[in-house]
Image (cartoon, rainbow, N blue to C red):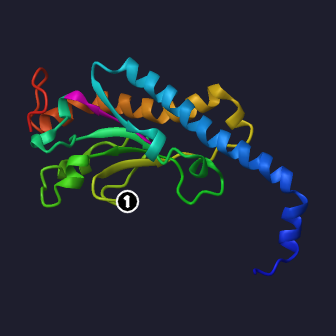
């Protein structure tokens, strides 16, 4: 049998409080993901003519959008370029997190094609405002990233603040892509009207 000490006594004294706290924690974990999925889904709806939605937010905590023109690059099954938000989970939105929620520009094609240098020109793209260039730093395929600030206790109780928290970085990335689209398409030999020509 384990030997109990003062810390165990404290837990025993507040046993019912711990039950309530655990119940609240589960509500926060579920509620944050539900709100993020709703907000990001609504954002995609505004841009669905240009971007394809791909997400596993509930199970894996990420929401991805890639330009329809760049999907299935070179018939690899991967997009040439995508924008998104990952690490969407309560533990990553807290001030104590070592792995904050992350917004990104990413090439899943580059990640999968280890010896293909055709995507190297991504390194010369202009950085989106508020982001930093992390070319292949976190893993091969990451181009730009931005760590999102921790949420305060007051912020998690404000639905409008939460919606903006999740959609603001992705809105900036969509705007960035559209302003750089002609350069990207030219660099990779893509013309409008012909999707995924790589």
- Find disc 1 in the rendering and name its residue: 138
Marks counted in the figure total 1
Q: Quadrant of residue 151?
A: top right
Residue 18 in the figure: left or right of residue 52: right
Q: Residues within 10 Å of mark 1 (few under 14, many from 20)?
A: few
Q: State the extent of the magenta-drawn residues as a range.
A: 61-68
Q: Quadrant of residue 172?
A: top left
Image position of 164 with respect to 114: above or below: above
Q: Main secondary structure of the magenta part?
A: strand
Can you say which quadrant of the picture contains the N terminus?
bottom right
Comparing 123 with 62, the one in front is 62
Residue 183 x %, y %: 19, 34
Q: Is residue 129 visible in this depiction of the protein?
A: no
The magenta stretch spans residue 79: no
The residue depicted at 71 percent of the width and 33 percent of the height is 157
Residue farthest along the front direction in this orientation: 1
Residue 57 x %, y %: 45, 39
């Amino acid at each position: 049998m384990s030997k109990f000490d003062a810390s165990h006594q404290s837990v025993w004294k507040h046993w019912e409080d711990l039950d309530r706290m655990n119940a609240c924690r589960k509500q926060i974990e579920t509620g944050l993901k539900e709100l993020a999925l709703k907000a990001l889904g609504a954002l995609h709806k505004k841009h669905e003519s240009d971007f394809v939605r791909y997400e596993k937010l509930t199970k894996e905590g990420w929401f991805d959008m890639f330009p329809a023109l760049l999907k299935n690059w070179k018939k690899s099954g991967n997009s040439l370029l995508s924008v998104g938000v990952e690490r969407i989970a309560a533990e990553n939105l807290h001030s104590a997190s070592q792995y904050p929620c992350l917004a990104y520009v990413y090439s899943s094609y580059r990640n999968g094609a280890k010896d293909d240098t055709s995507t190297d020109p991504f390194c010369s793209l202009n950085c989106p405002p508020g982001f930093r260039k992390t070319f292949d730093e976190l893993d091969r395929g990451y181009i730009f990233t931005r760590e999102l600030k921790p949420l305060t206790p007051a912020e998690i109780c404000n639905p409008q603040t939460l919606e903006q928290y999740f959609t603001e970085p992705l809105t900036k990335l969509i705007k960035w892509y559209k302003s750089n689209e002609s350069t990207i398409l030219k660099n990779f030999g893509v013309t409008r009207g012909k999707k995924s020509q790589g």
